[in-house]
Amino acid sequence: ETGVTQSPTHLIKTRGQQVTLRCSSQSGHNTVSWYQQALGQGPQFIFQYYREEENGRGNFPPRFSGLQFPNYSSELNVNALELDDSALYLCASSFWQADNEQFFGPGTRLTVL
Amino acid sequence: AQTVTQSQPEMSVQEAETVTLSCTYDTSENNYYLFWYKQPPSRQMILVIRQEAYKQQNATENRFSVNFQKAAKSFSLKISDSQLGDTAMYFCAFGRSNSGYALNFGKGTSLLVTP
C-alpha cells in the first residue's frame, strides 16, 4: 500500500508569482483535502475534493484553487502569491465514509519572498 | 463553526512518566469524531487515536488513551510510559460525521520527553 506523497518538498517563490503543488493519494482513497499550516500553528482547511469536484472550502480566497484527477491525485494552485502564503501545505487523503480518518502526506514547504 | 482549543502550548515529561494533554472544543452538532494527531519534528502527521462522539467508552491505543467528556466538550490525551520517540507536536482535531469534510485543528501542544 502506497502512502500519500507530495511534490515538491520545498519551493521558493517571489510575491506575485503562481505555484502548483501536487499530491498523490493513498491507494484506495477517493477524497483529498488540502491544509495550510503556518509556522507554529495548527493546519487550516483550504478545500476538499471528492470525485473530481470541490466538496467544501475553508476561509481562503479564490486565488487558492485546486483540481482532482481521475486517479484521485490532486493539485493545489495559488495565484498572486503573498508573503503570508509562506507555510507548510499538507495534503490528506481518505475514503469517503463516516470515519473521517485522513492520512497526511509529508507536506510542501512554500517560502514566498 | 467548530473551534478547538489546546491551552497548553508546551509540556515536558520525563521518560516512563505519564502526561496528559488537554483539548476542549465547541460545536452544536451531536455526531462527530475527535482525533489526536502527532507531528514529529520534520516528519509527517500521523493519527494517534480517534473517538466517535456516540461512543461513551474512551478510546485506547496501547500507551495512548483519551478522557472524552461529551457534556463538558473535553477530549484529553493521556500518554503512559512516555518514550523519547513521543517528542512531537500533538494536535487535537474535530471532524464531522458522515462526510469527508474538513478537520478543525487546535494550535497544538509541543511535548518534550526528557531522559
Image: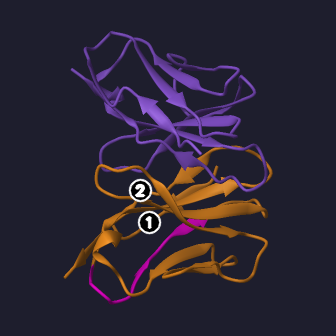
Q: Are marks 2 and 1 in contact (CB under 8 Å)?
A: yes
- Looking at the rendered structure, the secondary structure element under dot 1 is loop
| B62 on left or right of A69 | left
Circle 1 residue: B6
| A37 on left or right of B84 | right
Circle 2 residue: B107
- Above or below — where is A74 with respect to A102? above
> Which chain is represented by orange in the image?
B
Chain A rendering hue: purple
Q: Chain of mark 1?
A: B
Q: Horizontal and vertical percent for residue B29?
A: 76, 59
- The residue shown at (73%, 23%) is A53
- Above or below — where is B30 with respect to A61? below
Q: Which image quarter: residue B81? A: bottom left
| B33 on left or right of A91 | right
Q: Give the magenta part as a residue range.
A: B13-25
Q: Which image quarter: residue B71? A: bottom right
* Three-letter code, disc 2: Lys
Q: How is the image coloured?
A: by chain
**Which badge, 2 or 1, is on the more N-terminal residue?**
1
- Looking at the rendered structure, the secondary structure element under dot 2 is loop
Does the magenta run of residues contain B23?
Answer: yes
* Three-letter code, disc 1: Gln
Q: Horizontal and vertical percent for residue B101?
A: 69, 43
Q: Nearer the viewer, residue A39 or A33?
A: A33
Crowdedness near tag 2: few (<14), some (14–19) or many (≥20) residues, C-alpha within 10 Å: many
- The residue shown at (56%, 51%) is B104
Q: Chain of mark 2?
A: B
